[in-house]
Image (cartoon, rainbow, N blue to C red):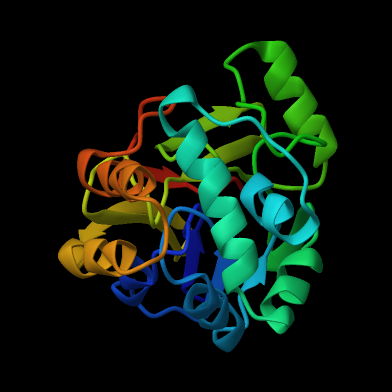
Amino acid sequence: MRVLVVADIHANYDALAALPDSDLTLCAGDTVTFGALPNESLDWLRERRALSIRGEEDDAVANGTFYRLPRHIEQAGIAGRAWTRATIAPARSAQLASLPPEYETVVDGCRIAMVHAYPGDYNRYLGPSDDELDRMTRAFPRAQIIVTAHTHRQSVRRYRDKLIVNPGSVGLSSKGGHAAFVLIEHGNLTFASIPYDVERAIERIRATALASDVKDACIRELTKGSLRPYTRLPMRASVPA
């Protein structure tokens, strides 16, 4: 089975449309905010019957919960959440509200767990200490792969008998104008990023009713690369036996 693992779409439908086909799609949260097409992005996941979880942006839009943002995009994020809340259809809002905070599934005999940022916390960055990694692995004792997101940076680290995998961001990748993702196939994890029509995504943001400074901040994230904490990336890793 070919499994596509994505996260941090941020309503960038043009980036989604560039992704490869798969037998199963897993989404580790933050489908909305910052991009111009939240409805279409949610529909893309629904049509592919993706197994999805909730990120802090999904929770903020669906339930009105406040989460802090990095300073350079704070005002854009707050305005983007309000705009998204007013833009998405009621059925899509219900779709967001129904997403679980964590999820586990078994694919070809491999148990995969997903959490957006950290167990019990949508907005906390996973640190490199053994204590932090212990807490992550204890939250999913049966999983062989733990998918996390939130940093917008691709990474993989082996800790004890598990792989902790971050697929990067589809919509606001650390490499501007590229959609990042992971494929799991034939016992291997392959990290990739592919270009998409970023000019079209920019045009869509320009066409929204967002304030001009908010649009500019969103476009900078698209074109310059999202500035968030990250770890280095090996390009391939075998699934734990």
**Residue 12 appears in the figure:** yes
Rendered view: 115 above or below 188: above
Q: Nearer the viewer, residue 218 or 122?
A: 218
Q: Quadrant of residue 170?
A: bottom left
Q: Residue at x 70, y 50 (%)?
A: 60
Left or right of 173? Residue 59 is right
**Image position, residue 32 (x, y; %):** 55, 60
Please tell me which residue is depicted at 56% across the width and 31% down the height of the picture: 69
Q: Tell me where residue 13 appears, x and y as whole percent.
A: 39, 71
Residue 207 position by quadrant: bottom left
| Residue drawn at point x = 21 percent, y = 39 percent | 224
Taking the image as shown, residue 130 lies to the left or right of residue 83, namely right
Q: Position of residue 115 (x, y in %)?
A: 70, 46
The answer, for residue 30, to whether it is visible in the render is no
Q: How many marks?
A: 0
In front: 63, or 228? 63
| Residue 72 placement, left or right of 25 | left
Residue, x 66% and y 50% (percent of image)? 55
**Does 92 sit above or below residue 84?**
below
Up the image or down, 35 lies above or below 115; here it is: below
Residue 4 picture location, percent across and down: 47, 67
Viewer-closest of 35 and 52 = 35
